[in-house]
Amino acid sequence: MSESANALVSPVIVCPAPPLKTMVSALKSLSEDAVLVFSPEGITSKVVDSAHVCMLEVSIPNKTFTSNTSESETEVAISLDNLDTALKLAGKKDSVKLSLVNEDTFLQVDVGEISKSVRLLDISLVKNPPAPVLSFDLSYSLDAESLKKAVTASKTVGDVVTFHFDGEATKITVDSKMERVEAPLETSKTTITSKEALSALYSVQYLVQMVKSLGDDVTISWGDYKPLKLISDDGSVSLTWLLAPRNQT
């Protein structure tokens, strides 16, 4: 627990269940536990997978909440499996009340008249990775469905997908000895810092996780030998993924 958390009144947040479930499900795809940061601006959390190939930052903005009593930043560490189990008490139309209890040793999850308390972890033992500052060769808004369909087709063929940019359009390809997938991506609002053709390889395994919860607003950035950054926002929860490139062979 941070020192500021001990000096202030513990925050209480009331939030619709779906954004919380989306947050925990996405974080769980990379890590068993996470540091949650409660603040007047909302809830944020960052995790990285054990191989340090993929990073995710999730943010639920304050406008999503019914109530938020946070006066400053409060950091807690928690098992994502345990938090996920508690959130399963809530239906799609339910609101969830989150509060720190027992001298901030438990996160209490209230759904209606049902309460479940989850013991917090030692925050010094849980990773809270810093977000790297990176530059990219190009970025654009993306049609979420076209990306989902492309990744779904790719996972049946191979483990590595190649992103190609020819200076105007982007397509992804996957090859195996028996099959090949080639899919154009529907893009708009393109920003290019390199007019040359670009190509990069990424793991299909992680892309499958990344496209599971795409919102209406999707932005993608990447480049030669550079990570792929995918930002998805549906208005109630924002997910920012960063995926390291595979070696070109």
Image: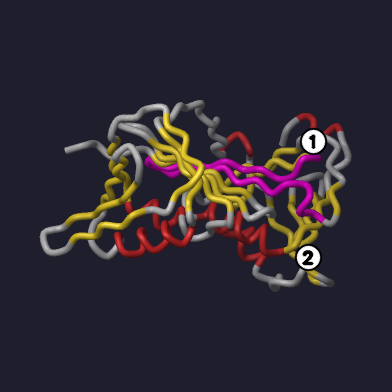
The structure residue drawn at horizontal position 76% and vertical position 70%, both measured from the top left corner, is 94
Let me know if residue 12 appears in the view: yes
Residue 10 coordinates in the image, percent (x, y): 84, 43
Horizontal and vertical percent for residue 242?
46, 40
User: At x 63% / y 55%, what residue is drawn?
Assistant: 234
Q: Is residue 158 left or right of residue 32?
A: left
Give the residue number, with chain letter if any, for mark 2. Answer: 95
Nearest the eye: 69 or 199: 199
SS category of the residue bearing label 1 = helix
Q: Residue furthest left?
A: 177
Q: Quadrant of residue 80?
A: bottom right
Q: Quadrant of residue 41?
A: top right
Sequence-first tag of 2 and 1: 1
Magenta stretch: includes residue 63: yes
Q: Nearer the viewer, residue 138 or 148?
A: 138
Highlighted magenta segment, given as a residue range? 40-65
In the image, 240 versus 79, the foreground residue is 240
Q: Residues within 10 Å of mark 2 (few under 14, many from 20)?
A: some
**Res. 246 image quadrant:** top left
Q: Is residue 17 left or right of residue 219?
A: right
Magenta span includes 189:
no
Q: Circle 1 sits on which residue?
A: 5
Q: Is residue 82 above or below residue 27?
A: below
User: Marks 2 and 1, Cα distance to the nearest angstrom?
Assistant: 24 Å
Residue at 74% across, 59% down? 117
- Amino acid bearing label 1: Ala
Locate residue 75, reporting x and y percent: 71, 38
The answer to whether 148 is drawn above or below residue 140 in the figure is below
Image quarter where the C terminus lies is top left
Amino acid at circle 2 = Ser
Question: What's the residue at 57%, 41% (across, down)?
Answer: 46
